[in-house]
Every structure is written in structure tokens, then in C-alpha cells.
């Protein structure tokens, strides 16, 4: 299957990064290279783009796409490792811009073999990095009941988590749950038919929760943001695209903390924390897709872009 992915909020990202032609830029989640290709098109021969991705399929595609571009270095790694890797390369305080797109690529969603979507039948996988051992099959068939309920509540904000997990446990006791279609049918059996047909997509929250657990998507995100600010130079920018409230809340809170001079408790009469703002918010409210983009790419509907500048 061809690696196709429409970059979300492309124009807004490029404008927000305020690209300098001789600058050092980082695309922490290259995917198919959509954002990266536009960033590199604005660089001179002295500019540099460091691209990261944990998906080997994405790495393969981008190595081919940028094989003749000496401005680009491609690294197979989880984006959360990027600040450490850049520091090891001697680039701390020398980065002009960082982009991280926390969404799942269209290729991953549409490729049934990857097992990300309830819309396509495939083995329960959901691994962004296929070299890791833990997959959705293991989570669904081996996690204790109470842990599964907690995951669905926490990562999917699924109010019907208990009933869904009870049905999962009853089914897996008979035989393993092996593919996305089986899981979807179990989830739908946990809801009244009028809700399934009237609302649709009742499997979405559960699939999201399992995917987040498999890939550890929220683990270390807070630390990644903090370390990313460290590697930026003064005037450098960090742009983050999120796709659900759990991610966006983490990004919003970290940015708010780093953009605030004093973080003492509200009733403290005199500042004792000594905290000084390290960034400024480029946009106080998240940037969302416009009507034209929504028409061309429905998956951009939940995307939120937040951008900061180091001061």
C-alpha cells in the first residue's frame, strides 16, 4: 500500500514556524514527509532538517523521497527521544524550529494490516513501531479486566467502559480476539442498537484508548515538551498538533507554565518561586482547520495547533 498522508494545517504550521533559510529544523513525526518537504523547500544549502519517525514504513518512504536532498537527516526513533539525540549531536540551543504532529497518519489508518481502524479488517496490531513487542492483540487478550476498564476510561473517556470490557473478557474466555472486526462487534454489542445506528462510530473511543496504551502516546509527552524548549535557540519556535483533548491538555498546561513568570500558589503574597517565563505564546487559542481544509481532509476536524517562541 502506498504511503499517502495529507499534512494537516500545513500553511498554518509553515507560517507559525517562521522559517529562516539557514536554520536548523526538526520534524519529529515525518510520516510521509508532507510538512518536511515544504520546510526544506524554504531552506538554503546551509539549512538543515532533522526528521524523526518511529514507523519503519515512514522512514523507508522518506529516505526515498529525500534521497537527493543533502539538507535532510532521517532518524528512526520515537519523537520523544529527539531532544536527547539532538543534544548528543551538539545541537542544544541551536534549533530554530520543531514540529511534532501527534496524529495517526492516513496510511496507518487506511492500511487494514496495521489494525488501527475499526473501519478496516485486520489483525489487532496498532503498533506505530512494528519492532516493539506489545500490540493491541496482547492488550485485548491479556490485560486484567480492571486495567482494561481503567484504560478505556482514561484514554478513551468511554463512559460505557465497564460493559465493553465485560464483553471483551467474556469473549476472550472462549477464544482469543484476533482482529479489528471481532473487537468492533464486541464493542457494538455493548450498546443499545438505537445508539449504534443513531450515533455511529461507537468503537472510536475504545480503539483510541487501546492505541494510546499500545504506543504509550501520553507517557513522556510532558517531558518531551520541556526538553524540546531547551534545545531551541532564542527566537526558535515549537509547533505541536494534537488530535484529542488528553494530548492538548498536556501541551496547553506545559506551555502555560513556561510562559508564566510566577507560578506560586494564588494566595502567596510575595513571589518565592523565582520562576521566569522562557517562552511566549504565538497563539493563545489553538489554531484549527478552515472550511477549505475540512472539505478536502475530514481528518483535520479534530486537529489543534499550538505554537510557542523561546525568549
Image (cartoon, helix red, strand yellow):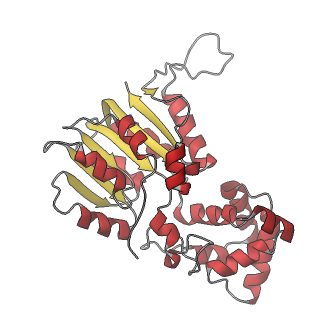
Side of 188 relative to 291 (left or right): right
Residue 10 location, x and y as percent?
A: 40, 46
Which quadrant holds residue 11?
A: top left
Residue 310 location, x and y as percent?
A: 38, 29
Question: Considering only vertical position in the picture, is 284 above or below 274?
Answer: below
Can residue 219 be seen at all in this image of the molecule?
no
Question: Considering only vertical position in the picture, is 125 above or below 33?
Answer: below
Q: Quadrant of the C terminus?
A: top left
Residue drawn at x 45%, y 35% as measured from the top left: 307
Side of 178 relative to 129 (left or right): right
Can residue 280 be seen at all in this image of the molecule?
yes
In this view of the protein, which residue sits in the foreground, 167 or 199? 199
Residue drawn at x 81%, y 73% as measured from the top left: 166
What number of labels is visible?
0
Residue drawn at x 76%, y 89% as measured from the top left: 174
In this view of the protein, which residue sits in the foreground, 136 or 220? 136
Residue 39 location, x and y as percent?
A: 29, 46
In this view of the protein, which residue sits in the foreground, 214 or 182? 182
Q: Quadrant of the N terminus?
A: bottom left
Residue 103 location, x and y as percent?
A: 50, 55
Q: Given the current orientation, which residue lies at the most extreme bottom position?
A: 175
Amino acid at each position: 500500500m502506498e504511503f499517502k498522508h495529507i499534512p494537516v494545517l500545513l500553511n498554518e504550521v509553515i507560517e507559525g514556524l517562521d522559517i529562516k533559510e539557514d536554520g536548523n529544523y526538526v520534524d519529529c513525526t515525518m510520516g510521509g514527509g508532507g510538512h518536511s518537504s515544504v520546510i526544506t523547500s524554504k531552506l538554503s544549502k546551509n539549512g538543515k532538517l532533522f526528521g524523526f519517525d518511529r514507523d519503519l514504513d515512514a522512514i523507508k518512504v522518506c529516505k526515498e523521497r529525500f534521497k537527493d536532498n543533502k539538507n535532510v537527516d532521517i532518524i528512526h526513533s520515537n519523537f520523544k527521544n529527539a531532544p536527547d539525540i539532538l543534544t548528543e549531536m551538539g545541537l542544544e540551543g541551536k534549533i530554530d524550529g520543531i514540529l511534532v504532529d501527534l496524529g495517526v497518519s492516513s496510511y496507518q489508518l487506511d492500511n487494514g494490516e496495521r489494525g488501527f481502524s475499526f473501519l478496516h479488517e485486520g489483525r489487532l496490531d496498532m503498533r506505530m513501531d512494528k519492532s516493539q513487542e506489545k500490540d493491541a492483540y496482547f492488550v485485548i487478550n491479556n490485560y486484567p479486566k480492571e486495567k482494561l476498564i481503567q484504560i478505556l476510561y482514561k484514554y478513551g473517556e468511554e463512559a460505557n467502559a465497564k460493559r465493553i470490557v465485560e464483553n471483551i473478557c467474556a469473549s476472550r474466555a472462549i477464544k482469543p480476539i484476533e482482529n479489528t472486526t471481532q473487537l468492533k462487534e464486541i464493542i457494538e454489542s455493548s450498546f443499545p442498537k438505537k445508539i449504534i445506528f443513531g450515533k455511529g462510530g461507537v468503537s472510536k473511543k475504545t480503539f483510541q484508548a487501546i492505541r494510546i496504551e499500545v504506543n504509550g502516546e501520553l507517557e513522556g509527552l510532558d517531558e518531551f515538551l520541556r526538553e524540546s524548549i531547551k534545545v531551541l535557540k532564542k527566537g526558535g519556535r515549537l509547533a505541536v498538533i494534537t488530535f484529542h483533548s488528553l494530548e492538548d491538555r498536556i501541551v496547553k498546561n506545559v506551555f502555560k507554565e513556561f510562559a508564566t513568570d510566577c507560578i506560586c500558589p494564588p494566595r502567596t503574597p510575595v513571589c518565592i518561586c523565582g520562576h521566569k517565563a522562557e517562552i511566549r505564546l504565538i497563539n493563545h487559542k489553538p489554531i484549527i482547520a478552515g472550511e477549505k481544509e475540512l472539505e478536502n481532509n475530514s481528518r483535520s476536524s479534530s486537529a489543534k495547533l499550538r505554537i510557542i517562541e523561546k525568549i
